[in-house]
Image (cartoon, coloured by chain):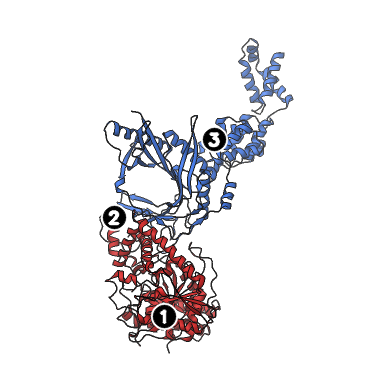
Chain colours: A red, B blue
Amino acid sequence: MSLLDYSALELGRLIAADEVSVREATRTALDAIAAANSDNNAFITVLEEDALREAEQVQAKLRAGELSGPLAGVPAAIKDNICTLGVKTTCASKILGDFKPPYQATVMERLQRAGSVNLGKLNMDEFAMGSTTETSFYGPTKNPWNLGHVPGGSSGGAAAAVANRECWYALGSDTGGSIRQPASYCGVTGMKPTYGTVSRYGLIAYASSLDQIGPLARSAEDCAAVLDLIMGKDPRDGTSLEAPCGHLLENLSADLTGKKIGIPVDCFGDGLDPEVRAAVLSVADVLKERGAEIEEFRLPIMEYVVPTYYIIAAAEASSNLSRFDGVKYGWRAENYEDLTDLYNKTRTEGFGNEVKRRILLGTFVLSTGYYDAYYNKALQVKAVIKNAFDDAFSKYDLILMPVAPTTAPKLGESLSNPLQMYLSDIYTVSVNLAGLPGLSMPCGLDKNGLPIGAQLIGPALGEQKVLDAAYAYQQDTNYHQKTPVGGAKE
Amino acid sequence: MNWEVVIGLETHVELATKTKIFCSCTTAFGGDPNTHVCPVCTGMPGSLPVMNKKVLEYAAKASLALNCDVTQYCKFDRKNYFYPDLPKAYQVSQLYLPIGRNGKVPIQVGSEEKVIRIHELHMEEDAGKLVHDNWIDQTRADYNRCGVPLIEIVTEPDFRSGDEVIAYLEKLRSTLEYLGVSDCKMQEGSLRCDVNLSVRPQGSTELGTRTEMKNLNSFKAISRAIAYEARRQEELIEMDHKRVIQETRRWDDNKDATISMRSKENAQDYRYFPEPDIPPMELTDSYLDSLRASMPEMAPAKRERYQREWGLSEKDAALLTDTRAMAAYFEDTVAAGAAPKQASDWIQGEVLRELKEKSLDIKQVVFAPEALAHLIDLVRQGKLNRNTAVKVFRAVFDDNGDIDAYVKAHGLEQVNDTGLVEQVVSDVLAANPQSVADYKAGKKKASGFLMGQCMKALKGKGDPKVVSQTLNKKLAEL
């Protein structure tokens, strides 16, 4: 049995007991990455030397008794839009190809303090824009369950690396489903916490009002442990919240007695693959066994969520990505006539098609004459969506719904029809628009052997409820422990 | 035809906070390029702004002092445009919910009083500075000024002359300086003013097409630019029968003219939208009440009080209240026991002379108001005469030296010993028989010479009044 078959918490216990060294764990992961990366391309940057050096430092601290905590010494991998001090942070874009941040993201500081080791930077859709990890300038990541399929996106590298047993957990980011959807496609557990609970300082922004960092791991329990490390108020992020944090793991409970779980019938209609529908509904049966009450209800917002999301996200993106102009860092066009030409050529050469499409869309919806018709209207609908969820959570503790309408599509199928790709985000984007916590967990395999995910959504700051339900589900099922077959190499 | 000039102002004022609006970098003027910067104010990817609470306080105080309605639920917006001095390619500003609206600023020109209406007052961040190096033909960016907090104060088109504009700016400068929210130094760019100007036939109620003038770096430049631009527009319409084009014009101090920069047709679409990185700010009633309670007494109130309570002239009161620091120096001197009139004379005479000679600001003066009061008191008590006191003042001004010690060390105490004075006068009269004879012969000028001889013999320390009385008495007795 490889060390990589242990969960993050199991490895943490072995390291704490000094039965496994941090170096051994790190070496094992680096070897697994080296063996797999040419096939699945999950990593953009592998930190071979840095990780081993860091491992020694963490080990020394552990021996000196300076580190405790359930994940001390457990290595992690990081999505490449999270700034790592002195380590290339590309956002999977040509325009940031050589960008080495002179500062550390808050989540990286927190992981370091907890004795984590950074294995490397994970592939993603360029600037987190995409649902397949095919828009990466550094080539697509492939789904470890079947290398002919996409891993989902934008945190596709993170989901693939965790699923393929190349690391124990990873940090991703979720703006419209970018943690939950790839977690679903790759059969891992991923969670987007409540907006404002994890600092965004050092997360290169796609859509500031929707972006949130979260974990991808093997189980809800591992996710709880990672969230305990990274959640908390940060004075460097004005949108971060003052909220209780750090006790999700110790309070984890599989008893769902008296918990009411709502199933929005609007999310189980047309467009949902029957296999996915059946698998997600079967989750309800397991939760019922654990004491939960299940009830169907109407969530009459689903036709608005995708357009609302794409207007708000694109508008913010068009502004956030304007700073990449070739003047200060990153890619600069080689030959240019004047300032305007420098901007035009740098951005034409530096950004990929999907990023350009969203910048254009965002620029359009903010333009004079269109602002009220699109952007302002979208803000109003966003408030309606939030109210719909508030209503639901006045009746239910949790909502259960699918993560995506289908399992992972084949490579090369999605980008030719971007509108179709956008529509597949229907079950995930509303959670970001309402700022809620959402978790994706494996709940079955389709007839092609590809993982199916179920989504649990909680009220704002309801992380514990969400994790408890997922934890309860994972006590009685073993989908989260299944490993890829077919695409995976021994 | 008689023309009326219509002017509105947009004034940018740098707030005097120690740190920038969204990070903890210093706002200090100058510094080597890119030394007052961090990932936040240079807009590095992943960095986030965090609101400096002092900026909100200063902007709210300014809004209250300019009689604005304060927006109690206040937000920032992004103004998007590409320029190398703007590292994020957007400026964080306020469009939809500016902190202050509908303000009123009373001004006085000559004997005429008038109220200038404030359209809005909003907070924003400053941009950096581009420096073109002709030697290497490259432009370099200095981001030290990026993120320095500004308020922009936009008036309604209420001005009808350059004098009104200057009176308003003086009032604005005084108000903000008194509040302590800005030092309003035009030469360091902490008060910058854009002038919107149009002309129309006298009596017309419609507004003409306006131009906006930039690069106005002094009150003098503003006055001249207004005069120039009004004449240019009038001549354009009257002599050339052309229309004024709505455009931005740059004032050139050397050419003494405004020059076209860009027309309205090329105006950018700034695509404003609410800044998602900074949560809305709420200014509660109690917070605003506490700000109102902390408002200092402003210049007009002080001027009125100086005249009423202390009997100063309007001119003296105006001079002493020019800046809050000057008024404080004066009031501290009075509080330390000096008669207001004496304190006023000394400050406007000796203190201002020192400031001028040494190019100092009253804030930089180390000579304590208590020391000045003591000096004034020594003169009042007759222990020093006025001229000697000025000498002492000059000797101790730079380092706030000990006045008593200086007077003692240099033997400057005024001689009030009448016996000694009589002796000296007698000696002088005895030594100068010719002058005495001249005096007796009716040459009254001779007494001046004798007086000088007496003061000389007393080493300047004699009380002139006592010496002169004694001399006159002795001459009469002869």
Work out which residue is located at the far top of the displayed protein and give it: B441
Given residues A123 and B240, the one toward you in this image is B240
Q: Which mark is residue B352?
A: 3
| Res. A155 in view | yes
Given residues B39 and A392, the one toward you in this image is A392
Q: Quadrant of the C terminus of chain B?
A: top right
A267 horizontally vs B291: left or right: left
Distance of mark 2 from mark 1, alpha carbons?
Answer: 52 Å
Q: Are callouts 2 and 1 both on one chain?
A: yes
Q: Nearer the viewer, mark 2 or mark 1?
A: 1
Work out which residue is located at the far bottom of the displayed protein and give it: A1
User: Against A73, is B100 above or below?
Assistant: above
B95 horizontally vs B415: left or right: left
Mark 2 element type: helix
Amino acid, disc 1 = Val
A259 horizontally vs A407: left or right: right
Given residues B323 and A128, the one toward you in this image is A128
The x, y position of residue B303, in whole percent, is 57, 35
Q: Quadrant of the N terminus of chain B?
A: top left
The x, y position of residue B372, in whole percent, is 62, 37
Distance of mark 2 from mark 3, alpha carbons?
Answer: 52 Å
Q: Are marks 2 and 1 in contact (CB under 8 Å)?
A: no
